[in-house]
Amino acid sequence: MNRIEVIQGSKRCYLFGVLGLVPMLGFPFALTALMRYRRIHSANGSAWNPASSYLTWGFGYGILGLLITTITVVLIAAAWLSGFD
């Protein structure tokens, strides 16, 4: 993977991570951010990545997006189930 692909992939990872922060609708974007992170991180190896901060933040936002979606689903399910009492 050449440096241009690494930079563009890092920026896309960041974009998907930010979009992944939207509760429930962002779930596929968060997964995409995590998959892009893994692909770019493994393909680039220890080579210098000038956009490594985008890659790192995209990964972090992807994880946070999955956590937000999980918490949202649990809260909605709990509210829905408590309505049957």
Image: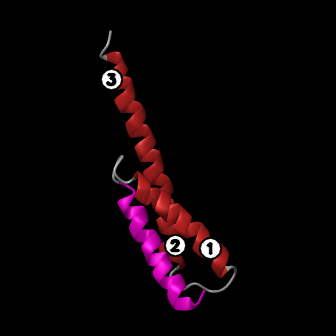
Residue 65 % position (x, y): 43, 52
- Badge 3 or badge 2: first in the primary sequence: 2
Q: Are marks 3 and 2 in contact (CB under 8 Å)?
A: no
Q: Specify whether residue 29 is painted magenta.
A: no
Q: Which residue is mark 1?
A: 41
Residue 70 % position (x, y): 45, 41
Q: Are marks 1 and 2 in contact (CB under 8 Å)?
A: yes
The residue segment tinted magenta is: 1-21
* Amino acid type for the residue under numbered disc 3: Trp
Q: Which residue is mark 3?
A: 80
Residue shown at 46% from the left, 82% from the top: 8
* Amino acid type for the residue under numbered disc 1: His
Residue extending furthest right? 46
Residue shown at 42% from the left, 52% from the top: 27
Query: Foreground mark, 3 or 2?
Result: 3
Instruction: Name the quarter where the C terminus is drawn.
Output: top left
Front residue of 60/78: it is 78
Q: Which residue is mark 2?
A: 55
Residue 46 % position (x, y): 69, 81
